[in-house]
Amino acid sequence: MLTSEFTVSEVKDAVFQMEHNKAPGPDGFPAEFYQVFWEVIKDDLMALFTDFHKEDLNLFSLNFGIITLIPKVQEATKIQQYRPICVLNVSFKIFTKVATNRLNKVAQTVVSPMHTAFLPGRNIMEGVVVLHETIHELHTKKRNGVIFKIDFEKAYDKVKWSFLQQTLRMKGFSPKWCRWVEGMISGESVGIKVNDEIGPYFQTKRGLRQGDPMSPILFNIVADMLALIIKRAKDDGQIRGVIPNLLDDGLSILQYADDTIIFIDHDLEQVKNLKLLLCAFEQVSGLKINFHKSEIFCYGAAKEMQDIYTDIFGCNAGEYPFRYLGIPMHHRQLLNSDWGKVEERFEKKKLSSWKAKYLSYGAVWSC
């Protein structure tokens, strides 16, 4: 299914699934161009897909992008405070969009059920509910356990291509599909846009581009290897999860893209084993954990050893309420004030756009 011949209908679906009013790539053609003139260009486009299927097409000629730095905070002064977004040629994104649609059909079978990001049939709130119920169970029943909230540094940009290829082969993807993915993510030429000027183009050597339709699902597959490593460690008795009374073998990990939370039983040796596993995962995957930005939460008897655990991980003890996927988390009932930031973000990002839809163009310009 993944490497079958491309059809006109699936390519058309991919083209018309692309959003409007998005910045075009270096060639200047937006998605609307391909949608409006579909009947004119479809034969030429399908000829490219035929060559690609035969592996006679080198995507390098289409694989160009412009990296724009988007500030993550107000008055950003450090490079770490910017998020790099890569604007790609739509002609190239059509290929990755078609591939993504195919990959989504099998994603459920290759990604752990505890990973809920960007997968059809899974909901962002599943992880939130599981985390809330786990915290409530640990606190009210005075059970022992440690929750480790991990912060990854620029996760998409750090992925090693060799590790991605190894992961795809390990999960059973065919050699042809692996070559297709390699051609889509490697060999790109990008330029960095600063103050409306684009610098010289250069080739990247690692990472998944934010702006590529395939990047989220590929990152899920890479991040899922951490869940697999932890599962094998559990099977070997190196670590144990929490609340085994509610889940078979206990809960060990929740993932939503790069938002990862690990649960482990209160045991010094197990915590040391977990630290070694995380360091090993860093080395093989390329992902870097910001231990100094990560947080740890201890329950039951683990509170007495909280300082030791924070020293092992090199992290801070977390404070309540903490946020997971933007939702405040606490073992007690949340206060109205705890939802302040959520309400603020909702009003800013959602309500403002909804209100604008009901304004005339004159009213919009006068605002």
Image: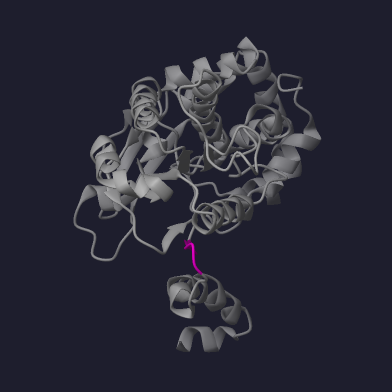
Residue 30 place in picture, x, y as percent = 56, 49
Whether residue 86 is visible here, answered yes or no, is no
Q: Quadrant of residue 87?
A: top left
- Image quarter where the N terminus lies is top right
Position above or below: 218 against 24: above
Residue 341 place in picture, x, y as percent = 43, 72
> Residue 307 vs residue 94: left or right?
left
In front of the other: 16 or 270: 270
Residue 284 place in picture, x, y as percent = 38, 20
Q: Residue 205 magenta-drawn? A: no
Whether residue 30 is visible here, answered yes or no, is yes
Identify the magenta region. Answer: 327-332
In front of the other: 112 or 101: 112
Residue occupying the point 46% across, 87% down: 367
Residue occupying the point 31% across, 33% down: 201
> Residue 332 vs residue 157: left or right?
right
Position above or below: 21 against 118: below
Residue 286 place in picture, x, y as percent = 36, 26
In front of the other: 40 or 25: 25
Q: Quadrant of residue 153?
A: top left
In front of the other: 258 or 49: 258
Q: Quadrant of residue 34?
A: top right
Residue occupying the point 47% across, 30% down: 63
